[in-house]
Image: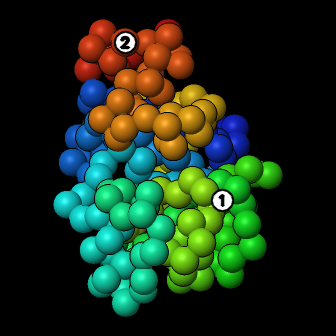
Amino acid sequence: MSEIIANLSHHFLIAMPTMADPNFTRTLIYVAEHSDQGALGVIVNRPVDMTLTSLFERVDLPLEVDRFSGQPVYFGGPVQTDRGFVLHRPVGAWHSTLAVNDEVALTSSRDVLQSIGKFGEPAEALVTLGYSGWAAGQLEQELAQNAWLTVRADMSIVFDLPPEERLVAAMQSLGIDFTNLSDVAGHA
């Protein structure tokens, strides 16, 4: 069992320019769970070429709420890319829900999609295919290697901004301009 330095649940991970893994280059990840067992999150700024309309057709569910129809589906990460995950607020009471805090949850059960399609609830939802996961100690090792910057999550970045503005907005919340980041790591 490895010890975590800080709990990064409800934080953003911002990929540094040196990120070599193409799955994570220029990504903004919302961390839904972080413990001594590992970490789990979803990429929130990488839409795929699919809308909720086409996803709902694919899984044979009606999408009756117009405001969700053109919303993109996102690449949430390279783990279980055949499975859907819904980052949402409010938390609600769906079957397979990980409540991150009192406001935000990540759900992987079909009933949340049914609710979105029929009632438009949860009111704010980002649907991903796949998730990003780290084994025990793996995220801490990547942080020590300067692969990620971390900042407390601001859900208005996820739910109110277009995907192409989310990474920059998260950087600005740290007071950093992404174009000024060096691709050379160092330790003071």
Q: Which mark is residue 105?
A: 1
Q: Position of residue 81 (x, y in %)?
A: 33, 72
Under mark 1, the amino acid is: Ala
Identify the residue at the far bottom of this view.
Answer: 60
In the image: residue 79, left or right of residue 12: left
In the image: residue 42, left or right of residue 75: right
Q: Depth check: 38 or 29 in front?
A: 29
In the image: residue 158, left or right of residue 107: left
Q: Which label sits in the foreground, 1 or 2?
A: 1
Assess disc 1: are there few (<14), some (14-19) or many (≥20) residues with their C-alpha within 10 Å of its C-alpha.
many
Under mark 2, the amino acid is: Asp
Q: Position of residue 36 (x, y in %)?
A: 68, 56
Residue at the image point whose x is 68% and y is 81% from the top: 95
Residue at the image point whose x is 30% and y is 9% from the top: 180
Report if residue 137 is visible in the image.
no
In terms of secondary structure, where does tag 2 sit? loop
| Image position of 77 with respect to 85: above or below | above
| Image position of 155 with respect to 113: above or below | above
Residue matched to label 2: 177
Residue at the image point whose x is 57% and y is 53% from the top: 124
| Image position of 134 with respect to 155: above or below | below
Q: Which mark is residue 77?
A: none
**Sequence-first disc among 1 and 2:** 1
Report if residue 158 is visible in the image.
yes
In terms of secondary structure, where does tag 1 sit? strand
Q: Position of residue 116 (x, y in %)?
A: 54, 70
